[in-house]
Amino acid sequence: MRPELLIDQYPLTEDEKNELKSKKIKKYKFSIIWAHWLNAFAWLVLTVTGVAIINNDKYNLVPLGFTQWMSSLFSSREYLLKFHVWLGIFWILDLSLYVIFGAKRYSPDIKSVFTIDTDDRAWLVSFTRKVMGLNYTFPPQGFLNAGQKLVAMAVFTMTPVIMITGLIMAFQLLPPFFIRASILIHLLAVGAVACALPIHIFMGGCKAHEHESLKSMITGYMSEYFAYKHNYKFWRDVKKAALANKRENP
Amino acid sequence: MAKYGMVFDLDKCIGCHACVMACRAEWELPADKSRCWVKPIGPENTPYGLASTFYIGLCNQCEEPSCVKECPTTATYKADNGAVLVNKELCIGCGNCIIACPYGARYINEIDKKVDKCTFCEGRIQRGEQPACVKTCPTNARIFGDLENKNSAVYKKVYEEGAVPIATARVNLHPNVFYLGKERDIHLIADSYAPAKNDVSISNQLWRIFSPLVVGGASASIIAAFIAFANQIRKGEQTEEDE
C-alpha cells in the first residue's frame, strides 16, 4: 500500500482496488447495529400506530380509512393506543441503557456527529450539485458522511423530545396546557425526522452503489475499498491506528 | 334506540344541592368537583321583571358537540342514545374538549387525570334506572327521559310545555338539556350563563397549520426517494467504477 494513501484520497490502481476489495474493515459494533435496527423498527411501528391514533376528521394526518383499519388490526382503538404507548416505553428503556452504560464510550462519536467540518459542507454542496445533474466531486468523509450526520443530528435531537412529550401525554405527567403543547411538539419532532428518513432509507438501503453501507449496518463490516471511497478519513484513521499499534507491538 | 334528554323545572328547584352530592357519591368524584352544579343567581332586573333563581346545569349532551370535534383521539364521542361520553382509555387529558365546551361542563378529574363530565349516569340508564341526580332531587325539579317517546314526561315538558335550551344565535349546538320556568328566570340564566364561544385551543389551531406541512414534507421526501429509485432502475444499476 502506498504511504501517500494515508495522507490523501488519491485515485487507486487496479491492484490497490482489488487488494482493498478483498479486505474487510469493521465499521459498526454489535451494540450500534442493535440500536440502529431497534430504532428503525420502533420508528416505523410507532409512526404508523401514532398517526392512526389521530382519528378526528379535523386533525387526522392520514385518511380516516387507514386509522379505522389500524384500529381493527389491533382489535380496538384502546389496544392501538396501548400498543403505541408500551412500545414507546420499551424503546425509551432500551435506548436509556445506551445512555446509562454507553454515554462515556459513545460521547466522542456523538460529538463528531454534531461537528460539520469543511469537507462536510463541501460534501453537501457536491450532493446538491449531483441531485441537480451538475458536475461534482465528493470530498473525503469520516465515519459518517455529511448526509448521514444530518439524519443522525435530527434523530439525536428529536428522539429525547419525542420521548419526553410522549411520556407527558401517555401518563398525564403535567397539567393539560403542557399535554396540549406536547401533542404539537411530538408532531413537529416526529415530522422533522420523518422528512429526512425516506431519503436516508433510499441512500442507505436502495441506492445502487451504497449496498455495502446497508450490509455494514447488518454485519458490522464493509470492504476496505468501500470505506476508502466513501469514508476515507475513517479508513485512514483505522489504518494509521493499526500501523501505530504494529509499531508499538511488533 | 332512545334519545335521552333532561329538563330542569326552575320553579321546583330549592337549591338544596342534593343532586350535586348524589352525583359525587355515585361517581366517587373529588370533593371539589361535580358533573353537575346548582348556582344561585339574582336577584337582578330583567326585561320581564326582577328575577332570582338557581342555574342548574350539567353537560348539555349537544346534538353537534364541539367537544367531540376537538378531541384528537376520539375519546369523546356521541353515543347512540344521545349522551356525549368520554372513553377514559383513549383520553390523554389534553383538555381540548374543556376549552371547546361552551357550557363549562367538563373538567380534569384529579384522581385519574382524565376528562370527566356528566354521562346521564350511563350505567344507571342502561339498567333502566334514572340518573342519580334525578332520583335524588326531593322536589322533582329534574325530569329525565326519552325525547323521542311522546309518552315520556321529558317529551311533554319540551314539546308541549315549552321547555327551552340555553343557546344563542351565535352558539347553538342543539343541546338536549332544557329549562322550564318563568320567563324572567330563564332570561336571567341565559343572560348570566350564555354559552361561551366554543373555542379551539391554540395547540389545535397550530396543529392545523403545521400538520399539512409535516405531512407534505414527509410525503415529498417519500416521493423524492421513489423518483430517485425509479431513475436508478431506469438507468440500470451503477457500479462503483461508473460513479
Image (spheres, coloured by chain):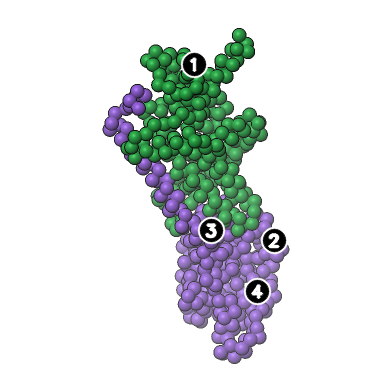
Chain colours: A green, B purple
Give a yes or no on whether discs 3 and 4 share a subunit: yes
Q: Which residue is mark 1?
A: A3
Q: Nearer the viewer, mark 4 or mark 1?
A: 1
Q: CA distance from mark 2 to mark 3?
A: 28 Å
| B140, above or below A66, in the image | below
Identify the subunit bearing mark 3: B
Question: Same chain for marks 2 and 4?
Answer: yes
| Vertical placement of residue A187 versus B146, above or below | above
Residue of label 2: B30
The answer to whether any part of residue A85 appears in the image is no
For badge 3, the amino acid type reads: Ser
Who is closer to the viewer here, B226 or B94?
Answer: B226
Residues indicated by labels 1 and 3 sit on the same polypeptide chain = no
**What element does badge 1 sit on?**
helix
Q: Earlier in the sequence, mark 2 or mark 3?
A: 2
**Kind of residue sitting beneath label 2:** Pro
Q: Nearer the viewer, mark 3 or mark 4?
A: 3
At label 4, which amino acid type do we have? Answer: Val
In the rendered image, the quadrant that contains the C terminus of chain A is top right
User: Residue at label 3?
Assistant: B203
Q: Position of residue A158 (x, y in %)?
A: 55, 44
Residue shown at the point (36%, 24%) measured from the top left: B240
Residue occupied by mark 4: B38
What amino acid is at disc 1? Pro
Using a 10 Å C-alpha cutoff, classify the residue at mark 4 as few (fewer than 14 neighbours), some (14 to 19) or many (20 or more): some
Kindly report which numbered mark, 2 or 3, lies closer to the viewer in this rendering.
3
Residue located 57% across and 52% down the image: A182
Question: What is the spatial separation of the Cα atoms under label 4 and label 1, in whole angstroms?
Answer: 90 Å
